[in-house]
């Protein structure tokens, strides 16, 4: 299973090559691809390019052994419920025992052929899509964030696959005012809403995988305090309204070198390698948002660097942009019941379980796609 933000332009070819290389390496029987922000920020202009992207992926020679395909792309941007989510599912020709749920008929049906739905998705009965209600956060701009669910039976195991896009941090300065931040609290409400919706009594609850762009961020306030332990911290305010405009952390000696500067859309840390190198375990101390859901959700151990915000400069595939504090925005989470049917043996040359980023040394856009490879623990293989 994989998650990715949709890319357009020059990066697309390399992005697809990395995907095909990964598929060739792991040889999965079932592939779930979840995309967020289809068409990008300028989706009205780019939606045609997005359609071409999905079409080229569906018809590529590398995917020829996947004889059944289901594609759901919410691209009807005039609609009030527009989420810009896209989900693609590829089923290998050797995988026979697979069914998809019809939420209208409340029954599972065999999957055959190529099933492509691109538009508002209203009336498509094999997918559930929802934009977060406007009344959730009246003080914030209503955005395209939401979720999309499909339900499957694979080798007698029922499961929900949920494409997720939660709210981002609009301002770095606001994000570091409190711990947890106001944005973190909003995401917590949104994720709890999704879990409640997919677990309610409209349908029989199933084990589930939630994957997409959760926009989880590090605990910025505590991280800044850690990074600036030996620094002098200055707060620069606007004359007009006394609002914080910049936070500058300077070394006390060394000619007062600026260690860290934070503005609304700037997070410039002089030792950027701190986020890129073998420092995952110490950084994970500040990754707290998923922990609030330990009662219902599990995640495989993270061993890869933060998945966002990578440079979109083709020549700098491992560098972060200095727009946001690097964070593990892109995740694959699962219910406790789903974790129970993951097969954990590593024999017969099996890859076991792999939770990692796609294209770590290639420019993949500002998000590195994250993937989870595993085998189902089933009674029939």
Image (tube, rainbow, N blue to C red):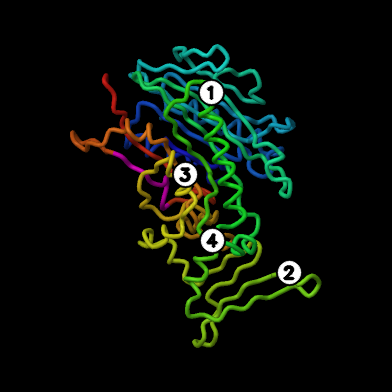
Label 1 environment density (alpha carbons within 10 Å; few <14, some 14–19, many ≥20): few
Q: Of circles 4 and 1, which is in front?
A: 1
Identify the mark at residue 293; answer none if there is no mark. Answer: 3
Location of residue 340 with respect to 223 vertically, above or below: above
Residue 121 % position (x, y): 63, 23
Real-space Cα separation, disc 3 to disc 1, in angstroms:
20 Å
Whether residue 359 is in magenta: the answer is: yes
Whether residue 200 is in magenta: the answer is: no
* Mark 4 or mark 3, earlier in chain: 3
Label 4 environment density (alpha carbons within 10 Å; few <14, some 14–19, many ≥20): many
Residue under the point 22% across and 38% down? 346
Relative depth, front residue between 238 and 119: 238
Look at the image and give the residue range highlighted in magenta.
Answer: 353-361
Q: Mark 2 = which residue?
A: 243
Residue under the point 27% across and 38% down? 352
Real-space Cα separation, disc 4 to disc 3, in angstroms:
23 Å
Of helix, strand and loop, which one carries label 4? loop
* Mark 3 or mark 1, earlier in chain: 1
Q: Mark 1 = which residue?
A: 201
Circles 4 and 2, Cβ within 8 Å, touching? The answer is no
Real-space Cα separation, disc 2 to disc 1, in angstroms:
47 Å
């Amino acid at each position: 299973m994989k998650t990715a933000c949709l890319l357009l332009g020059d990066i697309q070819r390399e992005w697809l090559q990395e995907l095909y290389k990964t598929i060739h390496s792991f040889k999965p029987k079932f592939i779930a691809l979840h995309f967020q922000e289809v068409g990008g920020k300028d989706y009205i202009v780019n939606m045609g390019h997005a359609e071409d992207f999905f079409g080229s992926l569906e018809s590529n020679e590398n995917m020829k052994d996947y004889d059944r395909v289901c594609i759901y792309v919410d691209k009807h941007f005039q609609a009030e419920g527009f989420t810009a989510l896209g989900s693609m599912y590829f089923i290998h020709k050797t995988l026979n025992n697979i069914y998809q749920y019809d939420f209208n008929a409340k029954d599972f049906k065999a999957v055959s052929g190529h099933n492509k739905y691109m538009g508002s998705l209203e009336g498509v009965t094999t997918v559930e899509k929802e934009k977060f209600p406007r009344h959730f956060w009246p003080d914030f701009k209503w955005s395209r964030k939401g979720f999309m669910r499909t339900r499957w039976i694979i080798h007698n195991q029922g499961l929900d696959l949920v494409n997720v896009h939660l709210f981002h941090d609009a301002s770095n300065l606001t994000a570091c005012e409190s711990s947890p931040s106001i944005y973190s609290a909003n995401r917590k409400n949104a994720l709890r809403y999704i879990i409640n919706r997919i677990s309610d009594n409209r349908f029989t609850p199933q084990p589930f995988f939630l994957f997409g762009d959760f926009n989880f961020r590090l605990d910025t306030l505590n991280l800044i305090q850690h990074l600036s332990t030996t620094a002098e911290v200055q707060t620069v305010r606007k004359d007009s309204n006394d609002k914080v405009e910049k936070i500058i952390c300077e070394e006390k000696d060394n000619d007062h070198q600026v260690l860290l500067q934070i503005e609304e859309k700037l997070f410039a840390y002089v030792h950027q390698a701190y986020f890129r190198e073998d420092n995952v375990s110490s950084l994970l101390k500040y990754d707290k948002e998923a922990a609030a859901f330990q009662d219902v959700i599990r995640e495989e151990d993270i061993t890869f660097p933060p998945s966002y915000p990578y440079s979109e400069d083709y020549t700098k595939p491992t560098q972060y942009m200095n727009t946001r504090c690097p964070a593990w925005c892109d995740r694959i989470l699962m219910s406790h019941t789903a974790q129970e049917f993951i097969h954990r043996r590593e024999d017969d040359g099996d890859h076991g379980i792999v939770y990692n980023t796609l294209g770590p040394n290639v420019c993949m856009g500002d998000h590195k796609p994250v993937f989870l490879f595993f085998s189902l623990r089933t009674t029939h293989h």
